[in-house]
Image (spheres, helix red, strand yellow):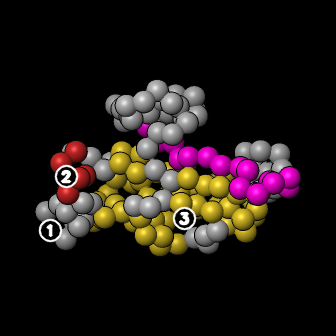
Amino acid sequence: TKTTDGVITSVGAAGLIDDTIDYTITVANTGNVTVTDIDVADGDVTFLSGTNPIPSLAPGETASFTVRQVIDATDIANGYVENSASATGDSPSGTDDVSDDSDTDVDPSNDPIADNETVDGPDPDTDTTNDPTRT
């Protein structure tokens, strides 16, 4: 899950190039076996807190990161900032055989999505499992 409080940190007027947005990435083990060596990837951000890779997550455990994205010219042209993260880890029976992409927690109208794995988010495709966070 990736969330943002929607606060843009500005170097001048809000919403300009080089302003920043902080996100919280939460990785949850919703399965029934421990997952180890979990690498969280997000090419658009700088990790501010959290341990990456995550050494292990038992079933039901979570780990969180704070990350920062810098607004660029493409974001300004689009009128929004879009971001996704992925996590890949090892099950007891394999290497890099457990993975997931972040999904937004809000629909295109900014209403909460109760189960973001089954409801499509703001991206143009109809895949419910890969919806980026838009700010």
Question: Which residue is the site of mark 1?
Answer: 12
Q: Is residue 105 visible?
A: no
Above-or-below relation of 57 to 128: below
Give the CA separation, mark 1 to mark 3: 27 Å
| Disc number lying in front (2 or 1) | 2
Question: Which residue is the site of mark 2?
Answer: 76
Dot 2 amino acid type: Ile
Question: Which residue is the site of mark 3?
Answer: 65
Q: Which contiguous range is marked in magenta?
A: 91-106
Q: Would residue 33 appear left or right of 111 to someone viewing this image?
A: right
* Residue 105 among those drawn in magenta: yes
Give the CA separation, mark 2 to mark 1: 15 Å
* Residue 98 among those drawn in magenta: yes
Image position, residue 98 (x, y; %): 71, 49
Residue at (77, 44) in percent of width and height: 31
Farthest left residue?
Answer: 13
Q: Would residue 84 appear left or right of 79 to someone viewing this image?
A: right
- Does the CB distance between marks 2 and 3 fall below 8 Å? no
Residue at (51, 30) in percent of width and height: 127
Tally the marks: 3
Q: Of marks 2 and 1, which one's residue comes earlier in the chain?
A: 1
